[in-house]
Amino acid sequence: MLILTKLKCRFALGDEVFVSAGGNAIQTAPDWINKTTLFPLVVKDKSLIVVEQQKVVAGSGEPEHEPEIDKEPEPEHEPESVKKTAAKRK
């Protein structure tokens, strides 16, 4: 997950430890930090803001990949306004 932290926070869960950078830094944090007792407290007082959270495909434990945005095909012909402007310049 992508987080913004105003304060330096130490999250611990079992043997895992993560320390946020603080100072309004945006950084990638492990998803397990939201299971700690500290997480809801720092979110509530706005010391930590979740910028983006990864979606996980149910049952797989793997992050879901967002589909690529379909780009509109480039027009084969120039629009009339471009043709008129080009004709005026000649």
Image (cartoon, rainbow, N blue to C red):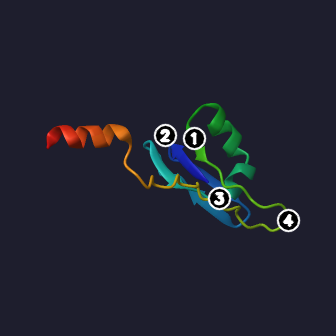
Vertical placement of residue 67 versus 47, above or below: below
Q: CA distance from mark 1 to mark 2?
A: 6 Å
The quarter of the rendered structure image containing the C terminus is top left
Specify whether 27 is left or right of 31. left
Q: Earlier in the sequence, mark 2 or mark 3?
A: 2
Report the amino acid beneath label 3. Answer: Pro
Extreme residue in the top direction: 45
Secondary structure beneath label 1: strand
> Marks 3 and 1, how far apart in space?
28 Å
Cα gap from disc 4 to disc 1, whole angstroms: 28 Å
Query: Which amino acid, by three-letter code, is at mark 4?
Result: Gly
User: Around disc 2, counting alpha carbons within 10 Å, would you say few (fewer than 14), some (14 to 19), or many (20 or more)?
Assistant: some
Q: Amino acid at mark 1?
A: Leu
Q: Which residue is mark 4?
A: 59
Residue type at mark 2?
Lys
Position of 55 compared to 25: left or right?
right
| Measured Cα–Cα span from mark 3 to mark 4 | 19 Å
- Relative image position of residue 31 (x, y in whole percent): 68, 57
For the residues bearing labels 3 and 1, Cβ distance under 8 angstroms: no
Q: Which residue is mark 1?
A: 48
Q: Nearer the viewer, residue 36 or 56?
A: 56
Q: Which residue is mark 3?
A: 67
Q: Earlier in the sequence, mark 3 or mark 1?
A: 1
Residues packed near mark 1 inside 10 Å, few (<14), some (14 to 19) or many (20 plus)? many
Q: Which residue is mark 2?
A: 6
